[in-house]
Amino acid sequence: MYFFLLNLSLIDLGSISTTVPKSMANSLWDTRAISYTGCIAQVLTFAFLVGAELSLLTIMAYDRYVAICKPLHYGTLLGSRACVHMAAAAWARFGCFLFIVLSYVQIFRAVLRIPSELGRHKAYSTCVPHLAVVSLFTITAMFAYLKPPSITSPSLDLVVSVLYSLVPPAVNPLIYSMRNQELKVALKKLIQSFFCQQ
């Protein structure tokens, strides 16, 4: 899982680095200028990274599927060599959304067969961060590309582009690290100290 998180972080860093610097420069100099070559490079790089992120999220769904549905075979199905091959495939891109959905259908079927409530809770808690990232990524992308033309405005387009390009990469590390108990304790202390000062 951590190997895939490293790759996800690199993809997120790349996608932010593709669009944000030029956008910030344009905002600072109050311009919308971009060269034709720069625009093409930006669009192609961003499209590649978005595809790679979707592929990696698919692989992470498979990782969760094997961990929950076939835990005794995890080491053989997802050895280090298999992980490297899958990460390389994610960087190379393949069709993903259907595979994510099918993986989670199988995961939920397996979890519902777990007899203890504690076991079901533990299995669900391993899936929630991944589902949150996938949902955030797909919902913002769908809204960006499928919103009706009647509700298009420059300010809404700016908000949607920020949601689509900045929010998912920025919150991925936070969402995945929320399973870390030490981070939860530190976050709880930070929130308590904030409200105690008020």
Image (cartoon, rainbow, N blue to C red):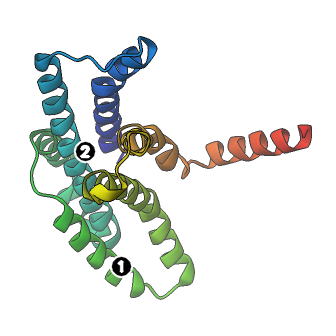
**Front one among 137 and 162:** 162
Residue pointed to by mark 1: 108
Q: Residue at x 45, y 37 (%)?
A: 170
Residue pointed to by mark 2: 53
Q: Residue at x 30, y 27 (%)?
A: 19
Image-based side of 23 in relation to 100, left or right: right
Position of residue 8 relative to residue 44, above or below, is below
**Front one among 149 and 62:** 149
Three-letter code for the amino acid on which mark 1 is drawn: Phe
Three-letter code for the amino acid on which mark 2 is drawn: Glu
Cα distance, mark 1 to mark 2? Answer: 23 Å
| Quarter of the figure with residue 95 | bottom left
| Quarter of the figure with residue 109 | bottom left
Percent of width and height locating residue 110 = 34, 81
Percent of width and height locating residue 59 = 22, 54
Position of residue 121 relative to residue 67, above or below, is below
Percent of width and height locating residue 149 = 27, 55
| Quarter of the figure with residue 138 | bottom left
Classify mark 1: helix, strand or loop: helix
* Rendered-image quadrant of the C terminus: top right
Find residue 138 and name its label: none
Percent of width and height locating residue 130 = 39, 57
Q: Earlier in the sequence, mark 1 or mark 2?
A: 2
Q: Residue at x 75, y 39 (%)?
A: 190
